[in-house]
Amino acid sequence: MAIAHKLLIAAFHMLSTGEAFRDLGESYLDQVARKRSTARLVQRLSNLGYDVMLVPKAA
């Protein structure tokens, strides 16, 4: 059911804006989830009284 919902949203967006379909890649939803999770956790720590500064790990 979730896949059908995503397809319906994609079709609606393409028809309403006239844009062609472009594949966002297999890792797109993982990146979105990571950004949301990061923002949620930073907000949670901030609500607990912490100042948070995120620094990416060196590869």
Image (cartoon, grey):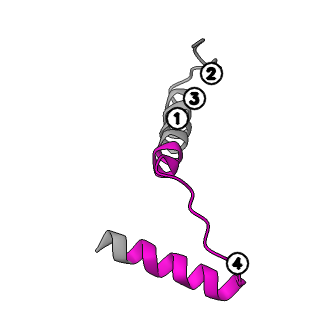
The kind of residue tagged 3 is: Ser
Assess disc 1: are there few (<14), some (14-19) or many (≥20) residues with their C-alpha within 10 Å of its C-alpha.
few
Upstream in sequence: badge 4 or badge 3: 4
Q: Marks 4/3: CA distance?
A: 39 Å
Q: Is residue 16 left or right of residue 29?
A: right
Residue 4 percent location from the top left of the image = 35, 77
The kind of residue tagged 2 is: Leu
Q: Which label number is shown at residue 54? A: 2
Q: Is residue 14 magenta?
A: yes
Instruction: Provide the residue designation for mark 4.
Output: 19
* Residue in the image at 66% along x and 76% along y: 20
Residue 15 percent location from the top left of the image = 63, 88
Q: Which label number is shown at residue 38? A: 1
Q: Is residue 54 magenta?
A: no
Residue 30 percent location from the top left of the image = 46, 45
Instruction: Provide the residue designation for mark 3.
Output: 46
